[in-house]
Each structure stands twice: as C-alpha cells, then as structure tokens.
Amino acid sequence: MIVVHHLNDSRSQRVLWLLEELGVSYEIKRYARDATTRLAPPELKAVHPLGKSPVITDGERTVHESGAIIDYLVRRHGGGRLAPAPGTDAHETYLQWLHYAEGSAMLPLMLQLYVGRLGEAAAPLQPRIDSEIANHLGYVDQALAGGDWLLGAELSAADIQMSFVGEVAGAFGRLAAHPNLAAWVARFQARPAYKAALEKGGAYSFARG
C-alpha cells in the first residue's frame, strides 16, 4: 500500500492529486507544521533523514522529492496514463517540465516567501526577485498559449508537478498579468480528482488562483 506522508500546506498535496487522477489506493499519514516556525515536525525524520515532505512509502521503498515521486508513481502505477510514451519528443518535453518545476521555477517564489518576512530589510533584493518571478511566470504563460495543458490537449503529470508553481504565484497575487497561467490554475482546480485530493488532504492555503 502506498502511504503519503502528508504535510499541510505543502507540495505533498499534488501527490494526493496525482493518486486521485490515477485511481490508485493510498493511505495518508498526516503531519502538522509548527505554528510559529512553519517547519515540518521532527517526526518526519523517522521516514526520511531530511525530515521533509513530500515523501511516500510503497511497501519497502521510500521515495522523496516531488519530481521523483511523480515519476515513480506514473511509471509503477500509471499504466501508461498521464505521461507520453518514452522515446517520443513529447516525453522529452514532459521530463523537462518535471525538472523545471523545482529546479528553476520555484526558486524565485521561495525567495519571495522568505524575504517577505524581512520587511524593509528585503528591499534591495525585491527588484531582482520580482524580475525573476515575472520571467518564469511569463515563460509558463507563453507555453500555455493555445492549449489547455502544458503538453497540449491532455492533462499530464507535468501539469500536476507544475501546479504548485501556479498556486503559489496565485497566493502572491502574481497571476493577473498572466491570463493563460491563471486559466490553467482555474482549470486544474476544477477537476474532480483535484477536489477529491483537497478534501482528503485537508486545509490547503494555496488552493486559490
């Protein structure tokens, strides 16, 4: 049985969504952030030494890192769904999105999250952060022009991996200038599997466009 070690307001919410889209049975083990520090509890270190979420266990195997988890679940439990066939050009594009989400797109958004707590001390950094956020959101917005999903007409696990980028951008009020991106967020948040995952995962601060 797949167990999702689920931390509130975290990237593990998209793992629940993927499993709902695939119709795969799973269990949720819940962890709560510290109300003051917003850090994950130390209990997560019993699952993986980094003490971070998302992390899943599937029998004897433990998998961490969002992209690796999504890739693993699609390959092991997807039955050919939510990813293009290996060896195709579409699959190469799919892999790029899987890695881009955390490798590039989330960095300026995470910097915004952290410097937002510094008040005036963050002022020298803000123009560069704003520029990088606009650059990355503009790139994704352009990629979505003329298509409902990142790979075109069909949802893929790349959309699920990238969803956190869109939702955090929305939480920071950064979607108004990127209509294709805003429409994509609204589109995936309307999916029944997304809503089912949200109901099972509990309160999620980023579930807004």
Image (cartoon, rainbow, N blue to C red):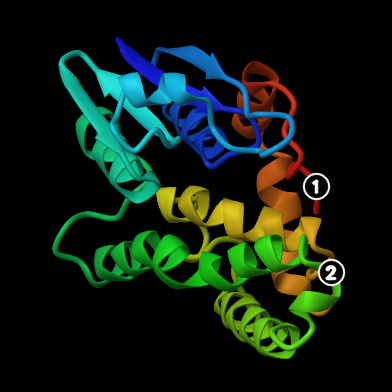
Q: In this rendering, does residue 20 appear at all?
A: no
Which residue is at the front of the view, 81 or 94?
94
Q: In this view, does 156 lie to the left or right of 181?
A: left
Q: Residue 89 at x, y = what percent? A: 24, 72
Which residue is at the front of the view, 12 or 199?
12
Location of mark 2 (residue):
119
Q: Distance between the residues labelled 2 and 1?
A: 24 Å
Q: Residue 11 at x, y = what percent? A: 53, 42
* Depicted 4 relative to depicted 164: above or below: above
Q: Is mark 2 on a helix, strand or loop?
A: helix
Q: How crowded is mark 1: few (under 14 residues within 10 Å), some or many (20 or more)?
A: some
- Residue 121 picture quarter: bottom right
Q: Which residue is drawn at 52% across and 57% down?
A: 162
Q: In this view, does 205 lie to the left or right of 129?
A: right
Q: Residues within 10 Å of mark 2 (few under 14, many from 20)?
A: few
* Depicted 181 relative to depicted 75: above or below: below
Q: Which residue is drawn at 64% across and 76% down?
A: 137
Q: Residue 141 at x, y = what percent? A: 64, 77
Q: In this rendering, does residue 32 appear at all?
A: yes
Location of mark 1 (residue):
208
What's the amino acid at mark 2? Gly
Which residue is at the front of the view, 153 or 92?
92
